[in-house]
Image: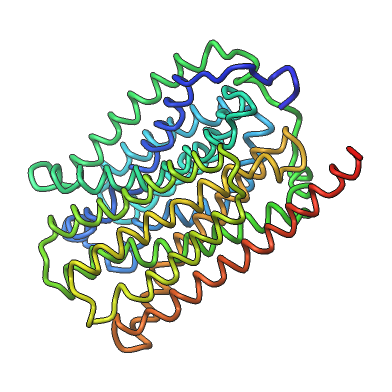
Amino acid sequence: MTPRDTVPTTHWALVALLVGAGIVSATQSGKAPLAVPAIRADLGMGLVAAGFVVSMFHLITGLLGASAGVIGDRFGHRRVLLAGYLLLMAGGVLGWLAPSGTVLLLSRFVEGCGFVGITVAAPSLLARVAAPRHHKLVFGLYGVNVPAGFAIMMVVAAILLPPFGWRGLWLANVVLCGVMLVLLFGATRPLGQAAGAPVARRSFRDLKAVVVRPGPWLLSLSFVTYGTLWAAVVLWMPTYMVEEQHRSVLFASLVGAAIVGANAVGNVVGARLSHAGAPAWLMVAIGGASMGVLARFIFPPEMPELGKYALAFAFSLAGGLIPASLLGSAAQHAPSPALVGSTLGLIFQGAHAGNFAGPPLLAAAVAVGGGWSKADWPLLGCGLLIVTLALGLRRVERRRRRPAVEAAL
C-alpha cells in the first residue's frame, strides 16, 4: 500500500461488507460437520474420507495461506476476492451434483482454494478502505469471520438438513455466495485502481522478507497454538454432548453454536481493546492463560453438566481476544505496507493449521489417556505455550520501539 492509497476516512459500509464476505466464506466450511452422517449414508463414504470433507478448508489454508497472500499482493486483492467467490460457487455446484465421495472431495478442494483467497484478500482490502487509525479495529473485527460463520451455519444446517437434505444445504450456500459476489462486485468497483489493480509486481521471493522476520512468525505460531486449543475443545463439544451426555443432535448444535458464537463476541471486544491501545502481547497472554485454565476443568466428570457448558462458553469468549490482537498487529509486523497481504497469509496459514490439527490431537489424547477426563493437561499445556509466545511477541515489539525512541531523542 503506497501513501496515495491511504484513505483519510474509513468507509464503514465497505468495512461491514468485507467482514460479511469473510463470514459468508466461513459458512462454507461450517456447513459440513452436521451434514457428515447424511453424506456418508448417501455416498457411502468412510469415516476418514468424511473427515476430510470437514477439514479440507483448514488443510488448504494451512498449506497455502502465505502463497495466497503473495498472489493477492501480485495480482490485486479485489480480483482474488471475486475469484475466490467464483471458486466457492463452482465448488458448491460440483458438490451439490456430486455422484460419489471422490467428486465431493474434489468439490471441497475447489471451495477451499476459493476460501483461502478470500481469507487473505478481504483483510488486505480492509487496509485500503479504512483510515490507518482504524486498522487495528477493522482487522480485529475481521477475526469474527470463522466463529460467526460456523455459529450461523450450525443453526442453519440444523434447520435445513431435515427437510432438504445435505444437497439442499449445499445449493442454498451456492445462492448465498452468489448474492455476496454480486454485492462485492458492485460495491468494490468504485475503488478503481486503489482496490482492483496490482499493488506491485510481487513474486514469491518477496515472501522471504516476511519469513525472515521474527514478528510474523510469532504471530503465526501464536495462531497455530490458539487454533489447536480452540478447535480441540469447541469443535469436539457437540460430539461430546451427544456421545457422553446423550443429548440430541439439535441440542448439541444449538449449544455448540452458542459456544462458537461466544468467540465472535470476544473478537469484537478484542478489536475494541486493540483500537484503544491495549498491547497485543498482553491480550494474547491473558487469552491463552484463561483458555488453558478453563479447558483444564471442562471435561473432568466431577464438573456438573451446566458447569461444563458455562466453562466452554467462557473459554471461547476469552479466546476471542487472541485473533483480534494478532490480526490487529499484522500491519505493524509486516516488512512494508505492500506486504501486509503476505504477512496476513502467513498468519492465517498458522490459524488454519491449528484448526486442522486440534481435533485429531484431542482425539489422540482421549484415546491414549483412556477417556475425556484425561484431556485436561494437554489443553493446559497449549494455554501455557500461548503465554510463552506472547512474551516473545512482547520482546520483539519492545525491540522495534527502542530504535524509534532513540531516533526521536
How is the structure coloured here? Answer: rainbow
Q: Residue furthest front?
A: 409
Query: Residue 3 in the image: x percent, y percent?
Result: 75, 21
Q: Quadrant of residue 37?
A: bottom left
The answer to whether residue 305 is left or right of residue 391 is left
**Closest to the observer, 324 or 238:** 324
Residue at 56% in and 53% down: 349
**Closest to the observer, 407 or 100:** 407
Q: Quadrant of residue 343?
A: top right
The answer to whether residue 37 is left or right of residue 227 is left
Residue at 56% in and 38% down: 276
Check the image and report above or below for 104 versus 124: below
The quarter in which the N terminus is drawn is top right
**Closest to the observer, 8 or 31:** 8
Check the image and report above or below for 57 versus 340: below
The quarter in which the C terminus is drawn is top right
Query: Residue 17 in the image: x percent, y percent?
Result: 42, 25
Q: Residue furthest left?
A: 163
Q: How many marks?
A: 0
Residue at 38% in and 79% down: 376
Residue at 54% in and 54% down: 283
The answer to whether residue 388 is left or right of residue 273 is right
